[in-house]
Image (cartoon, helix red, strand yellow):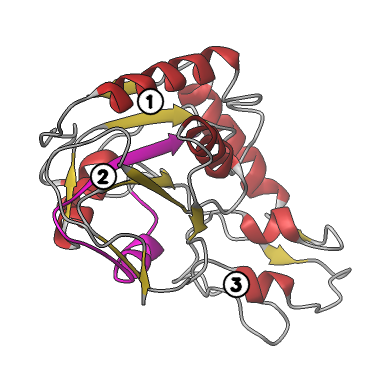
């Protein structure tokens, strides 16, 4: 069990507050946001939770950032398993939703409620834009200079606070009963696949079989990590699915969206 801190306090003391950043980033977009946060918070320690990591316990004098991508307006299903490994003790936290220029929908509220079950109190939150995991042409180049400046301003205000109070995140409390808006795209190995197993090893959802690298569609979250890390560029989404997805995303993701902050 990793212990980041031991002292308990309910009041933020700038010179004593510690920071911890956790990020779930299959294709690197969420990590790019987490990197900005880490640098602004004094090179705060980062822990990747895209695949299962170590158990962590945080006390109330650490401010935790949970950075995650948004899939169909929800948090990735594996986040529930990852958060089982992270325990707070009335610990302040900031959910950071990273989306592909469509919408956050209920993801911030869902993440806040999940964190609360693990002993965390949401004291701020934000949404940021990164390239869409299915079609990176949407949200390309984000976060850009404008996004970064807004995020840094938010973090500066956060650091200036003398104390923390719970902040409600936006979203529909009945999100669990709503249909998920994610596009069901399942990558498959092409004939060039050499069976190296990288995709199997690093799949966040455990959705790839060890033999022949076939996708288990019931587990796949369509994060596209296997496509992005394939050593031979031989793992792809079938062309008809890609074209259909592009047409759908063009209607939803073409207009520029802006980051939003809750403090």
Please name the residue that numbered disc 2 is placed on.
93
Residue 85 included in the magenta stretch of the image = yes
Residue 31 lies left or right of residue 181; in this view the side is right
Residue 119 included in the magenta stretch of the image = no
Question: What residue is shown at x 34% (from left), y 21% (from top)?
Answer: 260
Mark nearer the N terminus (1 vs 2): 2
Who is closer to the viewer here, 104 or 158? Answer: 158
Mark nearer the N terminus (1 vs 3): 1
Spatial separation of the CA atoms under disc 1 and disc 3: 40 Å
The correct choice, above or below, for 210 with respect to 221 in the image is: below
Residue 95 lies left or right of residue 69; in this view the side is left
Query: Cβ–Cβ below 8 Å for labels 2 and 3?
Result: no
Please name the residue that numbered disc 3 is placed on.
215
The correct choice, above or below, for 193 with respect to 263 in the image is: below
**Magenta residue span:** 75-99
Residue pushed farthest bottom? Answer: 211
Q: Quadrant of the N terminus?
A: bottom left
Question: What residue is shown at x 49% (from left), y 51% (from top)?
Answer: 45
Who is closer to the viewer here, 237 or 259? Answer: 259
Q: Residues within 10 Å of mark 1 (few under 14, many from 20)?
A: some
């Amino acid at each position: 069990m990793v212990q980041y801190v031991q002292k308990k306090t309910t009041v933020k003391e700038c010179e004593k507050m510690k920071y911890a950043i956790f990020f779930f980033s299959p294709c690197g977009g969420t990590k790019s946001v987490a990197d900005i946060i880490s640098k602004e918070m004094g090179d705060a320690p980062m822990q990747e939770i895209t695949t299962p990591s170590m158990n962590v316990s945080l006390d109330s004098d650490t401010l935790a950032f949970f950075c995650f991508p948004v899939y169909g307006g929800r948090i990735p299903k594996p986040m529930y398993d990852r958060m089982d490994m992270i325990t707070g003790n009335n610990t302040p936290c900031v959910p950071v939703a990273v989306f592909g220029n469509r919408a956050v929908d209920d993801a911030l509220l869902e993440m806040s409620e999940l964190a609360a079950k693990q002993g965390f109190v949401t004291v701020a939150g934000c949404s940021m834009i990164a390239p869409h995991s299915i079609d990176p042409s949407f949200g390309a180049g984000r976060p850009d200079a404008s996004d970064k400046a807004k995020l840094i301003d938010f973090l500066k205000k956060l650091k200036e606070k003398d104390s923390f109070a719970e902040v409600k995140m936006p979203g529909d409390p009945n999100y669990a009963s709503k249909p998920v808006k994610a596009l069901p795209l399942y990558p498959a190995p092409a004939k060039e696949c050499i069976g190296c197993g990288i995709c199997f090893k690093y799949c966040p959802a455990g959705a790839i079989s060890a033999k022949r690298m076939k996708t288990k569609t019931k587990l796949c979250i369509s994060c596209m990590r296997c496509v992005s890390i394939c050593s031979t560029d031989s793992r792809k989404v079938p062309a008809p699915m890609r074209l259909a997805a592009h047409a759908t995303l063009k209607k939803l993701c073409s207009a520029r969206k802006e980051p939003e902050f809750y403090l």
